[in-house]
Image (cartoon, rainbow, N blue to C red):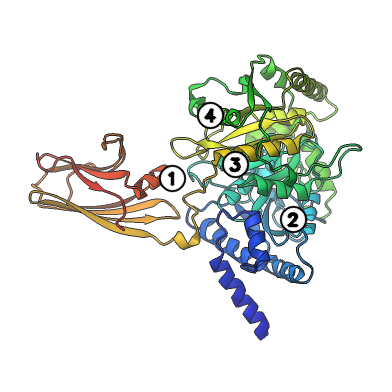
Amino acid sequence: MKSACALVFCALSLAQAQSFEVAEASIADQQRAMAEGRVSSKALVRAYLDRIAAFDQRGPRLNAIITLNAKALEEAEALDRERAAKGPRGPLHGIPVIVKDNYGTADMQTTAGTMALLGFVPSSDAVQVRQLREAGAVILAKSNLHELASGITTVGSAFGQTLNPYDPSRHPGGSSGGTGAAIAASFAAAGMGSDTCGSIRIPASVNNLVGLRPTKGLSSITGIVPLSTTQDTGGPLARTVADLAAMLDATIGDLPTGQARPKFLDALKTGTLKGARIGVLEPLFGDASDDAEVIRIVRAGIQALVSEGAIAVPIPMPELLAALDGSSVIALEFKEDLAAYLAGQPTAPVHSLDEIVRGGLSHAALEANFALRVAGKGRDSHDYKIAMAKRTAIQEIIAKLMEDQKLDALAYPTLRRKPARIDEPQGGVTCQLSASTGFPAITMPAGFTGDGLPVGLELLGRAWDDAKLVGYAFAYEQAAHHRRAPARTPALSALRPITWQTKASAGNATVLAKFRLDPGTNLLSYSLTATGFAEGDLLAASVHRKGKDENGPAIAVIANHSFSNVEGALTLSDPDRAKLLAGGLYLRLAARGKDTNNLRLPLKPSE
């Protein structure tokens, strides 16, 4: 039986979890609240667990989380006691974070998204997990990923497909898509991903987050299930640059002799873009019609950099794409590196990629990918020597370009296209430049497409200029303010369905419309009752988006025939949900009668 003191503490923790709003709360917000006694680490953990329960397998069903830490509340309570006795260890003390499930955790399974590793618990924490624990962070959960980190849409045999919180019909990027979706939906304060070719930056881009692929060697990859040790890096994704900086300060590793340790929180200063020379890397913008909307948003982002004092320098560089071609070594290293990792884990249930494939232990979406990589020729092949030579060459080309042009960074879209729909391939990928040079690259929110999908602008810097990039991103963030939470994962206090009704009449004819909006899914349910119409008079009912002259295009057909009563539901996009709440949608009736044709009912919920 719990002691009275323990019961009081539990009650206090629950009350704090209900009173402190964690949705979109920054690490600094949470530290301030803990310092003032308004919330505890235990209450933060409880609040985030409540959000995961509400949105991961319910509501939009993001499917971003693989494993919850069963001891998270206990660990948070211990950190609360430590804070009371000694004060905080630093910026991450008591802060709940999520790590991608290819980071080894000695107290939780590490599946890397494949059913082949279900139940596998590594012998030790990955180095960056250990660093987070030492900084006082609470490892709240492990997030879903593209199986074995081998793709960019986050699907795998162990836990299926993760969805994008901004539009669940689309993927959340990858391979760190579970982390991206989880942090966008405020399942934790920040999260860790890994990036072999875009796997931090792509999910950051399509989830309206900031993410850094660090200079190769700045952070440790020890204990992360490998895809390609030459290209693998690990780093954070966060909702704000300050949160990213706090995570980076805690997880950077032992640097080469003579290399100064970056201080990321110290780099957060406005005005850092003044005089910065930013090369606009034109070959990575593309010219396909499917790229046009995203490219327009990214170019507007570059103009925002200029507005903050940066100097944009066009870089045509027609030879870039040919120089990058063939510089990836993932297909040549994956099989060997995975086998070496598994050989060092006595309890691993499988020992090779070939064993996984032959055992039918991978997702069908990975069949062609894994077949190619099982057949990889390895490090002793001529192909590998050519690829490594190409990597050296592109590194030298970019270093010389930046030196000759006196450039501080290169700018380009993180993706040239919006995130693809589930089960469709993703086009417009630009990830290879950072992966092949080993130079750092940061992606930051640039805005949204017309249908509410986030777009990312990427900056690549010279080796070890990671903190400079973070400083640029901070100055841009403070000016641009592009962070916007997904409408489908609101504060839990806002989850109550909204119900209302509206009525319109013409002569003897009346239409009564009843609506119900589910904030967790954007599902708009409706019931229309028509009375007083002549038989066959009604022709159709449709939902429209207001235009400049009040009339606007139809976004959904509710009925395409005469009716006295019709019921159903439609799922709104985030922009259309916002328009509905602001009075920007209406219901239109088409009828034969002169008085009843074009009858309109506003859809805005009544106060």
What's the residue type where badge 2 is placed?
A: Phe
Which residue was labeled with disc 4?
Answer: 300
The tag on residue 478 is: 3
Identify whether 394 is placed above or below 607.
above
Which residue was labeled with disc 2?
Answer: 120
What's the residue type where badge 1 is placed?
A: Asp
Q: CA distance from mark 1 to mark 2?
A: 39 Å
Count neighbours of disc 2 (C-alpha within 10 A) and say few if under 14, some if 14 to 19, many if 20 or more. Answer: many
Mark 1 or mark 2: which comes first in sequence?
A: 2
- Secondary structure of the residue carrying numbered label 3: helix
Q: CA distance from mark 1 to mark 3?
A: 24 Å
Kindly tell me whether residue 151 is visible in this rendering.
no
- Secondary structure of the residue carrying numbered label 1: helix
Total marks in image:
4
Q: CA distance from mark 2 to mark 3?
A: 43 Å
Q: With 339 as the anchor, is 239 left or right in this view?
A: left
Count neighbours of disc 1 (C-alpha within 10 A) and say few if under 14, some if 14 to 19, many if 20 or more. Answer: many
What's the residue type where badge 3 is placed?
A: Gln
- Kindly report which numbered mark, 4 or 3, lies closer to the viewer in this rendering: 3
The tag on residue 562 is: none
